[in-house]
Image: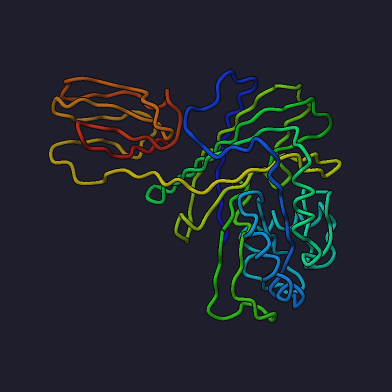
Amino acid sequence: MTVKMKITATVLLLLTLFFSLKISAQTQRMMLVEEFTNVGCVPCAMQNPAFDALLAANADRVAVVKYHPNWPSATDPMYPLDSVGNEVRTDYYNVSSVPAAIVDGNRYFSVPSGLSQSIIDQLLAIPSPFEMKMRFKADSVYNRLVVSVEGQSLSASMGDVRLFVALIEKEIHYETAPGSNDEVDFYHVLHLFVTEPTGFALGEMESGQQFAFDFDSDLALNQPLDNFSALAWIQNYNTKEVYQACKCDVLPTLVDETIWADFEVYPNPTDGLVNIISNGQNVSLFNVWGQCVFESTGENSLQFDMKRYGSGVYVVKIGPQTRKIIVK
C-alpha cells in the first residue's frame, strides 16, 4: 500500500515555553539504528532474530527504522510502502549489500550480527548536543495525523543539520513468507517519511536555540493505530552523524460520538464557517492538543469562522457531550 500525505508544517524558532502536554522527552542521547533488509536476503533471515532481540532489550534507549530496498527481491512487499524513502536512504548511505546496520549515521556501519551490547553502551555514553521530544496523535475516524517535534541545541551546531520524521510500523506478520528467505515477522518497518526523506534543514544553530515543528496530515492506514510509532532524528547531512533521536507511540484522539438529541454541528467537515445549535448549553471548542480556543455560554445557536484557527481536527463540547469538527 502506498500512502500519500499532505503535510503542512509550522516552524517556530526561539520558543520561550515548551508545550504543557507531557510527552516523550530525551535529556540524554537516544541511539538511531537503521537497518537495510529484504525478503529475498537469506543472511537477513539468519541475523535478524538475534538483532531484533538485542534492539528489544534496549527499547527505551534505541530508535529503530528498517528500510526494504527492492533488491535482491524486486517483489518485497514493504518496499512500496515508501519506495522513495527506501531508495533515498539506500543511496544516501551507498548501501550495496544487505543486511546492513547503521548506528547514529557514522558510528557503526556493518552487518547486524556485529552489533553488541557493549558497542551500544559505548555509543550511548557519547553526549548529545541536542535535546528533543515529540508527540504523535492520530484519528482513525477522520484520517488525521498530527506529529509535533520540539527541542533545543545545547551547543552551537555547524553545517547542514537536518530534521527527519518517519512513521514506523512496529510489526508486520505474514501467514506465508512473502519472499525466498522464509521470514514471516518484520519489525520497525518504514511506513512513510513525514518530512521529505532528505530531511528538513535546521541550518546552523546557536547554543540554547529552541525549535518546534507541527505536522498536520491526511492519514490513511490499514493497520490498528497501536501498531504505529513515530521517530525523529537530527542528522548532519554532510558527515552523516546523527546527533539525537526520539520516538513516541500514537496517542489516539478519543471522542464520544454518541448521537445528540437536538444538537447540531454543520457543515462538518467544513471549509470555514460552522453552525452550532446548542439549545442554551455551554459550548467549548478545543484543538487537537486539548487547548480551549473558544467558549460560549447560554446561547441557542452560534456561527463562527474556523479558518482563524487553521485546518485540522477540533473537538466541540456542548454540555457533557463532545463531537469532532474537521476543518479542511
* Image coordinates for residue 202, horizontal then vertical, percent: 72, 31
Instruction: Name the side, left or right, on which 312 lies relative to 171.
Output: left
* Image coordinates for residue 221, horizontal then vertical, percent: 48, 57
- Residue 101: quarter of image: bottom right
Instruction: Name the side, left or right, on which 113 lies relative to 214.
Output: right
Q: Residue at the location (68% across, 43% down)? A: 245
Instruction: In the rendered view, tell whether residue 128 sits above or below residue 168.
Output: above
Q: Residue at the location (62% across, 77% down)? A: 178
Instruction: In the rendered view, tell whether residue 245 sits above or below residue 87.
Output: above
Depth order, front residue of 280/236: 236
Q: Residue at the location (85% across, 41% down)? A: 238
Instruction: Name the side, left or right, on which 44 lies relative to 284.
Output: right
Quadrant for the N terminus, please: bottom right
Q: Residue at the location (65% across, 50% down)? A: 63
Depth order, front residue of 206/69: 206
* Image coordinates for residue 141, horizontal then vertical, percent: 37, 50
Instruction: Name the side, left or right, on which 16 lies relative to 307.
Output: right
Instruction: In the rendered view, tell whether residue 215 sits above or below residue 138.
Output: above
Colour convention of the picture = rainbow
Quadrant for the C terminus, please: top left
Depth order, front residue of 301/140: 140
Q: How many numbered callouts? A: 0
- Residue 115: quarter of image: bottom right
Depth order, front residue of 209/3: 209
* Image coordinates for residue 24, horizontal then vertical, percent: 55, 40
